[in-house]
Amino acid sequence: MFAQVIVDIIHVEVDKIFEYSFSEHDGVKLGSRVIVPFGKKMIEGIVIGIKSTSEYPVNKIKPIFKVLEDTPVLTEETLALTEFVCKSCYVTRACALRLLLPSEMRKGKIKEKYTIFYELASDINVDQAISQLKASAKKQRELLYFLAENGKTSSAELSDAFGRSAVLALLKRQFIYELKEQVVRSPYKQLDEQRKRVQLTAKQLEAVESVENSEKGTSLLFGVTGSGKTEVYLEIIDRTIKADKTAIMLVPEIALTPQMLKQLRARFGDNAAILHSGLSAGERFDEWWRLRNGSAKIAIGARSAIFAPLTNIGVIIIDEEHDGSYSSESSPRYVTSEIAKFRAEYYGAKLVLGSATPSIESYNNALNGKYNLIELPERVNKKPLPLVEIADMRNEIRRGNNSFFSSILKAELSECLEKGNQAMIFLNQRGYSKTVVCTECGHVQKCENCDVSLTYHREDDSLLCHYCGAKYKMISACTECGSKFLRYGGTGTERVVEELQTLYPNARILRMDRDTTQNKEGHYKILSQFAQRKADILVGTQMIAKGHDFPFVTLVGILDADASLFFSDFRSSERTFQLITQVAGRSGRAEEAGKVVLQTYQPSNSVLKHAIAYDYKNFFAQEVSIRKATAFPPFADIVRILISGEDEEKTLEVTHQLHDKVNLLYTQKRDIFRFFGSMKAPLKRLQNKFRFQVLLRLESNHKEVIDELYAISNAFNSRSIQISFEVNPNSLV
């Protein structure tokens, strides 16, 4: 027999199928992980096909060295998914396969965890056994009595209490015997709880029935914040599990996974397994296998959980489907919804996209009849959406207020705290200050590896690059002119907390950003403290903007609300609208009415006006007309070819060569192109590599042309020059 194997090497030259021989007794199956000889090395690979004959001379085909697991790690569906990822994301098979396995498993660094237990032998009479022991064997006698009373006990516990020598002596006499049991490393054990089942409203039940009965495979659940979308998801999952199928539930932030897992465990017990990068290697490995072997039927997690090793999938739910985190910004650059559509179609499953602010593409698909549109226009408690008040920061400065907080926000914060309620302050910039600027020469401290300014972090008095993670000591003088007159430019979450503590010395304040949530349970601990009212104010970045439900939050402050409007990205208006709406939705979710203070220097901006009125439909009409007139998605496809390398001249030379090759195709098919040009990338240097790009915009539905562009660009890949190929990238930085 012969196995077709993809070896675990990401390189274009070995992106092909290799054949190895095996016998029927070797346990080789489709989807098996195997060790094979490759050149002078032994390397891991995946069996993607099995044949009874081979076109190659049998004496030249090497045998498979070892099969790593009895159960194949991949199924026919996930192997088909690999091919889909290769073709849609333009990556090698090995690169696509890595998405489907825990990285620690692939590297052989993690295995099942076992614990040794001891128990009395079934035919042993304790008194008779003790009579055979020496008078001095006191610990052995105590151990036998202990096991007779307590039954099976772990090796560690017995050794601590009676000594290892006593355990071994009884084992040698066969008075006790050894048991080896697998221990499942379960994350977030403290989340287990009982929860009353919520009675769905008529609107929620209609939404569930609409998903089930729709002839369309994809449904868009368009519901305002607080409209009860989560309970709709839970009911759909419940019905799916009762139909003996499996489910995938995705949330945009790791911060939201414990909260969702808590609700799933309360309703489905151990049937829910969590997958995300914040788990320990052992936890991720065990949760992955629980899903693969069928002991868990619901996968919950952030973006990567879309690759959960489930079979017979009945529903895939993507909450906050508009969120940019669902698009991978490292290779393979996949879009989660596209992967979800493939898996849903394969199993005939339902795909549910939920959001209070759907992406332009999704809502456009719903209006055009491609998706089943379901609307939940009111909050479950029938309460109005929170009132949004604009604070014009231009007027604040004219009045001499140089604080980060407008007079309106300070007054509202004081009233909120006096009433014993809670507040959330949103600012999408962590650290103390965005930049450190010399007031003499104007020099801004930049990262040595990236073309970006460093962010000052006061807690450890350091300068940090938020792109590559490089850390530097804080300077005492300008590195250009030597001046000691330095100024902090911009505001970060650290600095906001510092000023809040000055303004409200008795307030208990928590901060939630990437710096305060680096360990596995960082998100959960901060959110738990706030939910338990152990803090009055929560200051945070995008982590606090969506999905959270805190009944005592009656005030939300949004600082620098218009900052994201001016990014050089065609999605900047959409993202600003979504962010403001999502953050505002955290307020007034219980009995007391909520309020939002939005601080801006652009109070007349139409995007902000639509956001404060929660007017998605008019925002969509405005945005979609602009996109149509200017030929941007969903009315066109953007192709970005990113060229990066450590040698600037060589990288630029390759960019020119690639541009010339693409230009030949552009000349032949100019009628379908709307834009073509090459330039420096907005972020000119990243992680010590210079970056250039070729950008194209062409009419939609011309995949054959995009495939040609990929073939052209891929030919320029080398060890010194990396080519990244993206279609409709999430970010053009």
Image (spheres, rainbow, N blue to C red):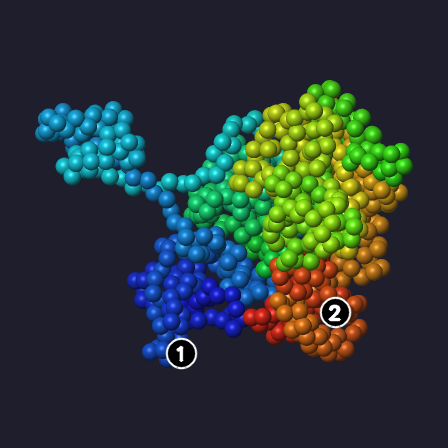
Q: Residues within 10 Å of mark 2 (few under 14, many from 20)?
A: some
Q: In which quarter of the image is the N terminus?
A: bottom left
Tell me the mark number nearer the camera, choosing from 2 and 1: 2
Residue at 29% in and 41% down: 180
Label 1 packing within 10 angstroms: few (<14), some (14-19), many (20+): few
The x, y position of residue 523, in whole percent, is: 58, 37
Q: Residue furthest top?
A: 419
Residue 610, horizontal then vertical, whole percent: 83, 42
Q: Which of 55 and 453 is in front in this view?
A: 453
Under tag 1, what secondary structure? loop
Residue 601's spot in the image, x, y percent?
85, 42
Check the image and report above or below for 412 versus 185: above
Q: Name the residue under label 2.
A: 678
- Res 404 label: none
Give the residue number, with chain letter if any, for mark 1.
Answer: 56
Q: Is residue 351 above or below residue 6?
A: above
Q: Residue at x 11, y 29 (%)?
A: 133
